[in-house]
Amino acid sequence: MYRKRFEEDIKDLEREFNRFWNFPQRITESFSRMGSSFAIDVAEKDNEVYVRADVPGVKEDDIKVFAGDKEMTITGDKPCFADELQSTNDKPDSFVLWHNGRSCGKFESSFSLPCEIQPKSVRAEVKDGVLSVTAKKQNSGESFFAVPVRKG
């Protein structure tokens, strides 16, 4: 019982450190045009880690996922409506954009995972504007074990 609670406390402490060290990155993201709508959830259950990210309007070919043992980076590029109009129009200056409220542009987020994963097990897919990433946890065994003490 005590060891399990200790491990949970260590995980909580590690998550707080990760939140602290990722703080400047979150400030940077809020200044990007896509950053404010780039929401990410991370969860773990049984032997897997799950990541969900909102990426509305982004094609799967425009998203990249990079995975390490305990970290992940998601990058992408959502096309801007004005850029689309300019590229498909013979006269680029022949349109007027009256309102530009949709997010667009390049986005990136790097974050720590709650545990080590097997990077080669990572699977990602986009459906209905949500990126779903699944990874198997690393089989690291017990983090603490009893050491027998022998009489000398």
Image (spheres, rainbow, N blue to C red):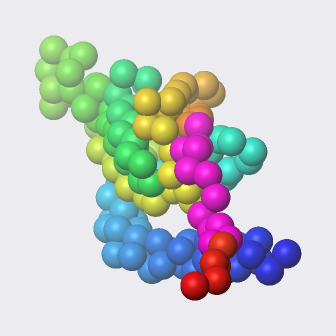
The quarter of the picture where residue 7 lies is bottom right
Give the tally of numbered discs.
0
Q: Main secondary structure of the magenta part?
A: loop
Q: Is residue 130 left or right of residue 28?
A: right
Work out which quarter of the rendered image holds the N terminus and state it.
bottom right
Asked if the magenta segment contains residue 77, the reply would be no
Image location of residue 116, percent across then percent down: 51, 52
Image location of residue 24, percent across then percent down: 34, 75
Residue drawn where x is 68% and y is 50% of the image:
44
Asked if the magenta segment contains residue 146, the reply would be yes
Q: Foreground: 58 or 121?
A: 121
Residue drawn where x is 53% and y is 74% of the image:
14
The answer to whether residue 37 is visible is: no
Report the residue that reaches farthest toward the front: 152
Work out which quarter of the rendered image holds the C terminus and state it.
bottom right
Q: Foreground: 102 or 35?
A: 35
Residue drawn where x is 64% and y is 58% of the image:
142
The answer to whether residue 92 is visible is: yes
Q: Is residue 101 left or right of residue 90?
A: right
Q: Foreground: 151 or 10?
A: 151
Report the residue that reaches farthest toward the bottom: 152
Image location of residue 31, percent across then percent down: 33, 65
Image location of residue 104, percent across then percent down: 37, 43
Placement of 150 over or under 57, stated as above or below: below
Report the residue that reaches farthest toward the right: 1
Residue drawn where x is 43% and y is 24% of the image:
59
Looking at the rendering, the stretch of residues picked out in magenta corresponds to: 136-147
Q: Foreground: 149 or 95?
A: 149
Placement of 57 over or under 36, stated as above or below: above
